[in-house]
Amino acid sequence: MSKKRTKRSGTAGKRLLALLITLLCAFATYLSGGASQPFEVHFIDVGQADCALVIADGKTMLIDGGEIGAGPRIIDYLRTHGVQKLDVLIATHPHSDHIGGLPYVVENMEVTRAYLSPYVHTSATYEQLLDDLAKKKVATSVPEIGETFSLGSADCRVISNGAGFDDANDASIILRVAYGDTSVLFTGDAEVPAEEAALASGMNLRSTILKVGHHGSETSSSQAFLDAVDPEIAVISCGKDNSYGHPHAVTLKKLTCEVHRTDKEGSVVLVSDGTTVTARGEVPVFKIYIGNWQNKKLHLVGCRYMPSFENMDFFWKRSMAIDAGYEPCGSCKP
């Protein structure tokens, strides 16, 4: 990115900008491989941590938010994939590798409703999340076991709300999301005791996709639980060469279905038309952000406050602009 500032004629600048935007849009369409599916699950690569985005008929839900410091990456990912608002936010339990980035997310994106585990933590990150949810006036509650809600035409059911456990991992919210004949089960860090409680509930656990519990640890994924879920696809969210040895060999041996891992593949995207699920991987999406180098404001293409061509800086990642000292425009909210 050049820092040289030269005056350009208004007409020439507009023509050049129009050409640039046209080429970028064509390139983005080529990379994306066409229109998005009505139901998508993005297991975002946040290292040795958890974060998943569910998009159903344009409605959005974020489940967990990675470690402290992951917030900018998550916001960057959401904006790049066209998410401007979260209809539902779920913090499965208050360990830092699940809620670390959520305060930043709440501060930088509109959230309508949040569901939290009843497990109370004393960490500064947990307290910050609670404070930010209150400050932003987000409707926040502990869900009831068996509670249902809709996300577009997807049906979401709380299998476990985490109540009754002294261990924070077992206090994870377990959520089943069904879209047509396909479904996905999110388990947080639930270990065998929580899995046994879910089995005892009598609720339907069978799911097309399983987010493997506790990053593939051997303390989760009991054979009885896996038999009940009977997944076609399993996804393990873990960091490359992590110190915990996740996923454990004993867990991998039990998974006789198709397995995807964020430590090997990066972000994993699964799409459904309501009948079949396809693993798409992380599709590179090219997006451009326009900065005004004079007032350090950042804009999306088409914003009414976009600067004149000679005052523009170009970024292909939101995080790059933020690192360069740019502040998001309050109108287009990049």
Image (spheres, rainbow, N blue to C red):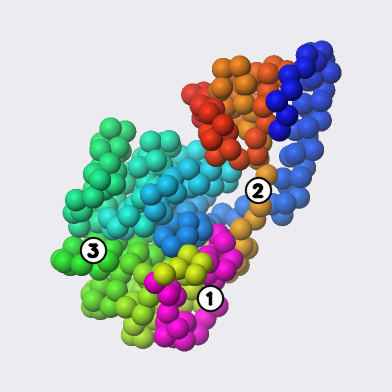
The segment highlighted magenta reads 244-269
Q: Give left or right: position of 105 versus 162.
A: right
Q: Could you give the CA–CA distance between mark 1 and mark 2, rounded to whole angstroms? A: 24 Å
Q: Position of residue 196 (x, y in %)?
A: 25, 78
State whether residue 272 appears in this view: no
Quarter residue 158 falls in: bottom left
Say which amino acid is labelled 3: Ala
Q: Give left or right: position of 137 versus 86.
A: left
The residue shown at (29%, 47%) is 125
- Sequence order check: which comes first, mark 3 or mark 1? 3
* Residue ID for mark 1: 259
Quarter residue 265 falls in: bottom right
Residue 202 against residue 323 in the figure, above or below: below
- Sequence order check: which comes first, mark 2 or mark 3? 3
Q: Secondary structure at mark 1?
A: strand
* Residue ID for mark 2: 285
Q: Nearer the viewer, mark 3 or mark 1?
A: 3
The residue shown at (49%, 73%) is 234
- Sequence order check: which comes first, mark 1 or mark 2? 1
* Residue ID for mark 3: 168
Say which amino acid is labelled 2: Val
